[in-house]
């Protein structure tokens, strides 16, 4: 015997179709919001790089003052291996996620995106964006 097939008729079919369309639109809007946050994060990192070009020593001092709990040697290594914007993002993420700078640097070098790291840490990309903006405002970058 063949399994029963449910056939929707009339209002039930309309309701199902409307709910399906609403759900698809919801998923698309969530994906769009996620992409917008990723774009905003990348833009923020690029802005730091542009504004701090050629000022590595000054930027290093700003990082050391703001991230006083991170050794100057770690910050110097980070600036040597990444851009200034990336360094700020990794330090902010390290503080938020309570993960080591070295571990985050290794993940980034291995191609793991900030979005993936943030998600694995139980955070949201907007949390990282807020932390970087707070650093910029406090440090005058």
Image (spheres, rainbow, N blue to C red):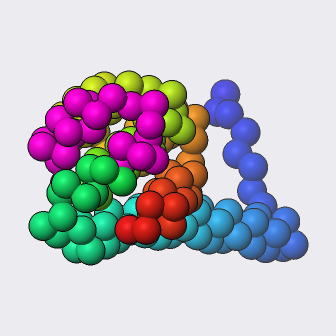
Residue 36's spot in the image, x, y percent? Answer: 47, 70
Q: Is residue 62 left or right of residue 124?
A: left
Image quadrant in which you'd find residue 13: bottom right
Q: Is residue 24 left or right of residue 92?
A: right
Residue 9's spot in the image, x, y percent? Answer: 81, 67
Q: Is residue 34 magenta?
A: no
Q: Quadrant of the N terminus?
A: top right
Q: Quadrant of the C terminus?
A: bottom left
Residue found at x 58% / y 70%: 29
Q: Is residue 64 magenta?
A: yes
Chain part drawn in magenta: 63-83
Nearer-the-camera pick, 105 or 22: 105
Which secondary structure dominates the residues rendered in magenta? Answer: helix
* Residue 13 seen by the camera: no
Residue 42's spot in the image, x, y percent? Answer: 33, 64
* Residue 32 seen by the camera: yes
């Amino acid at each position: 015997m063949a399994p029963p097939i449910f056939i929707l008729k009339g209002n039930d079919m309309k309701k199902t179709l409307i709910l399906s369309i609403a759900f698809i639109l919801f998923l698309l809007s969530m994906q769009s919001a996620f992409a917008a946050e990723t774009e905003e994060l990348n833009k923020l990192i690029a802005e730091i790089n542009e504004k701090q070009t050629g000022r590595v020593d000054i930027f290093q001092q700003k990082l050391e003052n703001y991230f006083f709990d991170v050794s100057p040697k770690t910050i110097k290594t980070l600036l040597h291996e990444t851009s200034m914007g990336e360094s700020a993002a990794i330090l902010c993420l390290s503080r938020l996620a309570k993960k080591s700078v070295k571990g985050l640097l290794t993940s980034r070098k291995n191609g793991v995106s900030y979005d993936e790291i943030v998600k694995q840490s139980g955070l949201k990309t907007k949390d990282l964006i807020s932390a970087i903006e707070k650093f910029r405002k406090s440090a005058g970058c």
